[in-house]
């Protein structure tokens, strides 16, 4: 599973948007490297497919346990287009990102990471140099 990512910025902030359909915040982890220059987003999107043995076997013996009798109702997939599994995506942060004010939220399957730009850098960018 490799989530789709959008990177953007405006005058005051950097943004990372990650599509994480069906995931909640307990399934996603964010870490900063020791030097605070790399942000890693990782997690695991668990499969909804039961891969246990005898998944598609027809059960004919009425003396089977209740656990096995429940397998009669197991879905049989004819096509699977969704991706599942572990993922890890790392991003080198710009030097003017204020790592002390990083904010993140996960809503409706979209992780939004908000990285404000440092104040001093914003002011420096506005200076013009006369020739």
Image (tube, grey):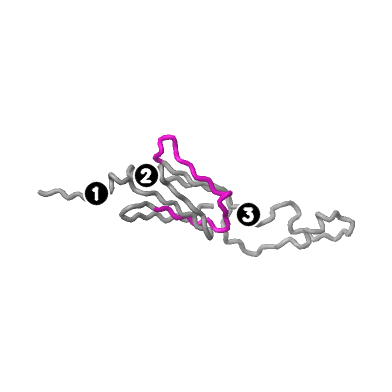
Where is residue 93, by image quadrant?
top left
Q: Residues within 10 Å of mark 3 (few under 14, many from 20)?
A: few
Secondary structure found at label 1: helix
Residue 88 highlighted magenta (yes or no): no
Question: Where residue 112 sits in the image (x, y, percent)?
Answer: 46, 54
Q: Which residue is mark 3?
A: 47
Q: Earlier in the sequence, mark 2 or mark 3?
A: 3
Compared to residue 109, the image places residue 28 above or below, namely above
Secondary structure found at label 3: loop
Q: Which residue is mark 1?
A: 125
Q: Which residue is mark 2?
A: 98
For the point 78% across and 61% down, the residue is 72
In this view, the mark in front (2 or 3): 2
Name, please, the residue furthest toward the top: 34
Compared to residue 45, the image places residue 78 above or below, namely below
Which stretch appears magenta? Answer: 15-37
Compared to residue 36, the image places residue 106 above or below, namely below
Left or right of residue 54, residue 82 in this image: left
Question: Where residue 13 sits in the image (x, y, percent)?
Answer: 35, 52
């Amino acid at each position: 599973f490799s989530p789709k990512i959008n990177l953007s910025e405006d005058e005051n902030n950097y943004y990372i948007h990650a599509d994480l359909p069906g995931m909640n915040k307990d399934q996603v982890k964010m870490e900063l490297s020791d030097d605070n220059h790399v942000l890693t987003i990782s997690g695991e999107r668990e499969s909804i497919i039961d891969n246990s043995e005898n998944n598609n076997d027809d059960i004919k013996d009425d003396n089977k346990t209740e656990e096995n009798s429940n397998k009669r109702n197991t879905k049989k997939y004819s096509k699977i287009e969704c991706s599942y599994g572990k993922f890890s995506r790392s991003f080198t942060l710009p030097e003017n990102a204020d790592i002390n004010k990083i904010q993140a939220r996960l809503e409706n399957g979209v992780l939004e990471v908000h990285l404000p730009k440092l104040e001093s850098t914003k002011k420096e960018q506005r200076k013009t140099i006369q020739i």
